[in-house]
Amino acid sequence: MINHIEKYIGTISHGSKSDSGSQYKLNIAAIPSSPNRDLKTYITLGLSKHDLNYKSRFEILFVCSLKYDENQIFPFLRWLAETIIENKKNPSSGAGCLFA
């Protein structure tokens, strides 16, 4: 998966690993965006290993301005991925479905 990400999105510069005691093995990778250097791309690694009762496997791709604190982005994406796993719901399956 890393080769695919780096081929189509960009080279991973760094990331955040899940804690050793974490229930889910989810990592977050950070990729400097180009051509717009004011943005950074984040992608989950590990969400696609979970059966979410959906016909396809997926990861979360998140692009935001560099002005946002990465120390808040990593836990937010981890929380979102864990919520999707726990609820076994695809976030694109309709408004409110993720938390219903």
Image (spheres, rainbow, N blue to C red):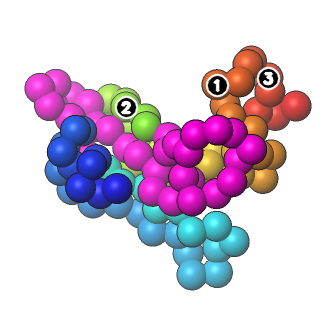
Residue 63 in the image, given as x and y percentages of width and height:
37, 31
Quadrant (top left/top right/bottom left/bottom right) for the N terminus: bottom left
Q: Residue at x 37, y 30 (%)?
A: 64
Residue 46 in the image, given as x and y percentages of width and height:
51, 59
Q: Is residue 67 visible?
A: no
Q: Is 32 positioned to the left or the right of 67 in the image?
A: left
> Of discs 2 and 1, which sits in the foreground?
1
**Which stretch is magenta?**
31-60
Is residue 21 highlighted in magenta?
no
Look at the numbered discs 2 and 1 and tell me whether their residues touch, using CB distance below 8 Å. Answer: no
Q: Main secondary structure of the magenta part?
A: loop
Residue wearing tag 1: 92
Q: Which mark is residue 96?
A: 3
Toward the top, the furthest residue is: 95
The disc labelled 1 sits on which kind of residue? Answer: Ser
* Circle 2: element type: strand
Nearer to the camera, 1 or 62: 1
> Of discs 3 and 1, which sits in the foreground?
1
Q: Is residue 30 visible?
A: yes
